[in-house]
């Protein structure tokens, strides 16, 4: 039981020494760690771990190596990962069938399995160490500290990389000094709005109340976003520590984690972390003998996107329907059960221990003038290196997409990047050298959001992209206020008409008017930002809207109603594979004459074609094209 700051210092030092001995090989063993994030676990990472344990035992090598599961490595498109310490070898795309070779070659005979190393696409050279891979070179891990390094279900490993050092320092300061430190760091909320976290804490600190609360917003709802999930899966104790520091600063003794139920691994590891912290005496009553008491509670969300909005989230915790509340009063004054409440998202709270551990100046020394520190992005879409990245604020979009993301697959041309999820906007090639920070993205017509970054190439139809996000917004609107409930529905109807070839020029004026109406009159940020995908695509890709309306064509050949499949008779060899694979039997054989010879070909009946694309997928000579 750790019942004093002195004992915590001793335990941290002991765990740090043990962890370093293990990583540096001072214990004489190899240490095999496997990615235990959701993505790799879905690709049999757990079964690979069990296979390692079985093969080591079978070969009598258990004394030479340990096997452990850690959090997300970030480079999701190359998982599952296996990393071996102390040699620091990183194997990627590992399968169960590779385990025996790794054990026999690497563990037994000290020979690296070259074929499983990452290959640099530009130099074609094999890269052994993680830090030498371009994907990681420009990253700086603050919120992701410990992820992919420690076992998230073992508090001793978390202590070994500095867990609760920030809390230890905070408890030696006054609550106001802690808030001043957070203010000096310049950290802004990573949940999307970018409100200065220290100011929010100060508001709650200044309100007199018999009870106050800290809430962690883990209701990550943006399509393609998995930043919060990965942090909770990789180092949940960092978020717990951040919540405790916040509780001490504002005078709260209870904290609530609100995490969507679709994150079962994160939820389970969070439960384990809370229990281990309680058992160690770091969480609970009279923490470290200081008189500060704090308890963590867990609430599961049902997956409503609107519950990412802080007041809707509070309603959900209270057992009410997740719908936004009018503001003011703001939650810092009147929040959970009418008491002062601060709400920070997972990433924000994960940064707090770093600020207290390393100092506000260290955190503020990274980033831009008005956007300090780092930002975690879920980089996805049409990019080679899909995954989770944490970069200093001020990193350019070009660095994110090309240096870290590895560029666009198949030599395609970059078209846009959607930042900020459904509430964000699309940024084009002209903005690639713009630094990423809160204010700059807003000025360019997008927003930081929680950190989703979806890359699009020349094959994406931007009208269809706007329609996709509007479908999501309509589905997720709580319906409380009519501008959002009705306005988004009308905008979706217009976009649907345009993508089906029934649009008119008046529709563009209506979209402009509706966008402003919904933005200016909706109750919460979900409605206020819902039209961003429309306004940004109209601004940057108006020619595509005009092509759909005037020419009745989709330039990217995505919108089915404006597309026809055609067989080029000069390329067709008459094999009939397309006809065999057609589910509606709309492809018929025909004869035509070329240069005096009667030749066989096939034709598609456009009136019967359902545009499923099966014919293109089976054609061996590329004779079928979209028009």
Image (cartoon, rainbow, N blue to C red):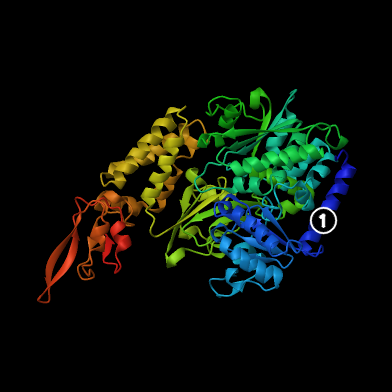
Res 496 seen here? yes
Residue 303 position in % (x across, y down): 52, 36
Question: From what the image shows, is residue 208 above or below residue 561?
Answer: above
Residue at screen point 57% across, 59% down: 79
Q: Position of residue 143 (x, y in %)?
A: 67, 50
Q: Quadrant of the N terminus?
A: top right
* Viewer can see residue 245: no
Horizontal side, residue 174 vs residue 431: left or right: right
Q: Residue 480: x and y, percent?
A: 47, 27
Q: Is residue 491 above or below residue 382?
A: above
* Circle 1 residue: 18
Q: Where 223 falls versus 109 (above or below)?
A: above
Q: Residue at x 72, y 68 (%)?
A: 87
Nearer to me, 248 or 334: 248
Mark 1: which secondary structure? helix
Quarter residue 264 falls in? top right
Q: Residue at x 54, y 73 (%)?
A: 122
Q: Position of residue 376 (x, y in %)?
A: 61, 51
User: Which residue reaches farthest right?
Assistant: 6
């Amino acid at each position: 039981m750790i019942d004093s700051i002195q004992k915590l210092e001793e335990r941290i030092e002991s765990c740090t020494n043990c962890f370093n001995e293990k990583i540096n090989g001072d214990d004489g063993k190899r240490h095999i760690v496997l990615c235990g994030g959701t993505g790799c676990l879905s690709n049999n990472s757990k079964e690979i771990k069990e296979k390692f344990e079985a093969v080591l035992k079978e070969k009598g090598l258990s004394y030479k190596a340990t096997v452990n599961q850690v959090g997300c490595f970030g480079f999701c498109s190359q998982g599952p990962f296996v990393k071996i310490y102390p040699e620091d070898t990183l194997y990627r795309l590992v399968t169960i069938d590779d385990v025996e070779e790794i054990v026999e070659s690497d563990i037994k005979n000290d020979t690296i399995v070259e074929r499983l190393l990452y290959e640099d696409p530009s130099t074609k050279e094999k890269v052994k160490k993680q830090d030498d891979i371009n994907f990681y070179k420009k990253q700086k891990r603050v919120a992701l500290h410990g992820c992919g390094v420690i076992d998230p279900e073992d508090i001793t490993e978390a202590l070994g990389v500095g867990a609760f050092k920030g809390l230890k320092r905070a408890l030696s300061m006054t609550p106001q000094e802690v808030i001043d430190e957070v203010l000096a760091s310049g950290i802004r909320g990573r949940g999307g709005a970018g409100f200065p976290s220290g100011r929010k804490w100060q508001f709650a600190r200044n309100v007199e109340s018999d009870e106050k609360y800290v809430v962690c917003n883990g209701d990550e709802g943006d399509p393609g976003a998995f930043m919060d999930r990965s942090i909770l899966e990789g180092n949940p104790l960092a978020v717990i520590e951040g919540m405790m520091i916040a509780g001490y600063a504002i005078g709260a003794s209870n904290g609530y984690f609100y995490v969507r139920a679709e994150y079962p691994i994160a939820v389970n590891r969070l439960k384990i972390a809370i229990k281990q912290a309680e058992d160690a005496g770091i969480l609970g009553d009279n923490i470290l003998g200081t008189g500060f008491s704090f308890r963590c509670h867990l609430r599961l969300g049902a997956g409503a996107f609107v519950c990412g909005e802080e007041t809707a989230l509070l309603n959900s915790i209270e057992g009410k329907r997740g719908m936004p509340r009018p503001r003011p009063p703001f939650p810092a004054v009147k929040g959970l059960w009418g008491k002062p409440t601060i709400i920070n998202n997972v990433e924000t709270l994960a940064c707090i221990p770093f600020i207290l551990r390393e100092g506000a100046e260290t955190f503020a020394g990274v980033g831009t003038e008005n956007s300090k520190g780092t930002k975690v992005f879920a980089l996805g879409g049409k990019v080679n290196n899909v995954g989770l990245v944490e970069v200093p604020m001020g990193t350019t979009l070009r660095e994110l997409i090309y240096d870290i993301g590895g560029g666009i697959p198949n030599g395609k041309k970059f078209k846009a990047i959607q930042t900020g999820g459904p509430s964000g906007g699309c940024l084009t090639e002209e903005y690639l050298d713009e630094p990423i920070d809160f204010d700059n993205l807003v000025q360019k017509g997008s927003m930081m959001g929680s950190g989703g970054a979806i890359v699009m190439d020349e094959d994406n139809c931007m009208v269809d992209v706007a329609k996709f996000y509007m479908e999501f917004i309509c589905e997720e609107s709580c319906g409380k206020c009519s501008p959002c409930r009705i306005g988004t529905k009308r905008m979706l109807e217009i976009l649907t008409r345009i993508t089906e070839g029934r649009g008119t020029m008046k529709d563009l004026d209506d979209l402009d008017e509706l966008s402003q109406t919904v933005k200016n009159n909706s109750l919460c940020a979900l409605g206020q930002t819902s039209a961003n995908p429309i306004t940004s695509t109209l601004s940057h890709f108006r020619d595509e809207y005009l092509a759909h309306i005037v020419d009745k064509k989709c330039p990217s050949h995505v919108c089915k109603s404006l597309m026809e499949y055609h067989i080029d008779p000069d390329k067709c060899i008459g094999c009939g594979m397309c006809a065999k694979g057609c589910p509606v039997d709309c492809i018929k054989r025909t004869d035509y004459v070329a240069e005096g010879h009667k030749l066989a070909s096939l034709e598609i009946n456009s009136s019967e074609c359902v545009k499923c694309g099966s014919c293109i997928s089976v054609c061996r000579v590329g004779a079928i094209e979209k028009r």
